[in-house]
Image (cartoon, rainbow, N blue to C red):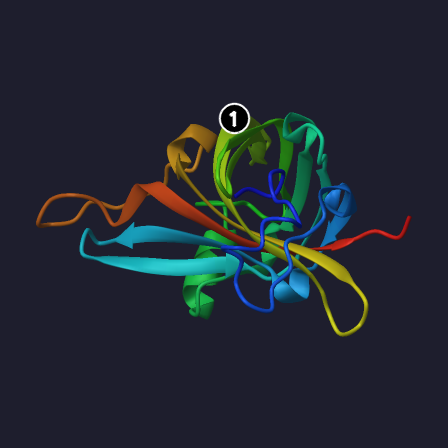
Amino acid sequence: MGIFDRKDTDTATATPGVVSPDLAALTGDYTIDPAHSTIGFVARHAMVTNVKGGFQDFTGGLHLDGSDPSLSTATIDVKMDSISTGSDDRDGHLKSADFFKTEEFPTMTFRSTAAQALGGDDYRITGDLTILGTTKPLSIDLEFNGAAKDPFGNERVGFEGKAEILRSDWGLTWNAALETGGVLVSDKIKLTFDISAIKNAA
C-alpha cells in the first residue's frame, strides 16, 4: 500500500514490529537530510562500462499532502562544485567549461510542478530541472521506503527515485570519438535519488 493509503487497522499483512504510519501524521513539510541522502548519476564510458558519481552538497525540501498526493511538492538545490566520481582529474574536467562550467553556473535546481500516485508505494513527481541556465521538464519515479521516528526524536520519511535524461538537452554536448566507433561519454544519463527527509517542527 502507498504512503497515502496505509491504515493502522491493516495489521494482518504488516511486517512484525513495524506499525503503518498514520496518514495525518505524515502530512506536512520536510527538510531533506543530506547526511543520510544521496543524489547520484551513472554515465556510460567508452561504450563498455559505467562510471558512477554524485553530489556531496545539496539542500531541499518536501511537502507531503496526505489527503491529496497531487498537491505534494519537492525542491532541490545542488552545488555543482561538489560533484564527485572518485577521480580528481575527472571531477575537474566535469567542473570545467567542457561540461558544467561551475564558476558560471554554480547551482543545479529542481522545482516540482506535479505529483502523481501510481499505486502501491509508487509515485511520480514532475518538475523543472535547470542546468547551465537551461530549464527542461524532468519526471522522477519514486518508491516510498517508509516513515519512522529516529532515536533523536526526528520524524523521517524515505524515498528512492530514478530518472533518465539526455544531457545534450541541457547543452552538455562535449564528447570524443572512439577509434572503434561510438563516443567516449554517453548522452543518456541515469539519475538516482535516495532521500531521507525530516519533518519540520510545527
Rendered location of residue 183, percent (x, y): 21, 45
Element type where label 1 sits in the image: strand
Within the image, what quadrant is residue 157 found in? bottom right
Q: Is residue 23 left or right of residue 115?
A: right
The furthest residue to the bottom: 151
Rendered location of residue 3, percent (x, y): 60, 43
Q: Amino acid at mark 1?
A: Pro
Seen at 72% across and 48% down, the residue is 22
Q: Nearer the viewer, residue 151 or 75?
A: 151
Q: How many marks?
A: 1
Q: Is residue 23 left or right of residue 18?
A: right
Q: Nearer the viewer, residue 159 or 49?
A: 159
Q: Is residue 103 above or below residue 74?
A: below
Rendered location of residue 114, percent (x, y): 61, 25
**Other-residue count near label 1 (Cα within 10 Å), few / some / many at <14 / 14–19 / ≥20:** some
Q: Is residue 195 above or below residue 98?
A: below
Seen at 52% across and 55% down, the residue is 12
The furthest residue to the left: 180
Q: Is residue 81 above or below residue 125?
A: below
Kindly identify which residue carries mark 1: 137
Within the image, what quadrant is residue 181 found in? top left
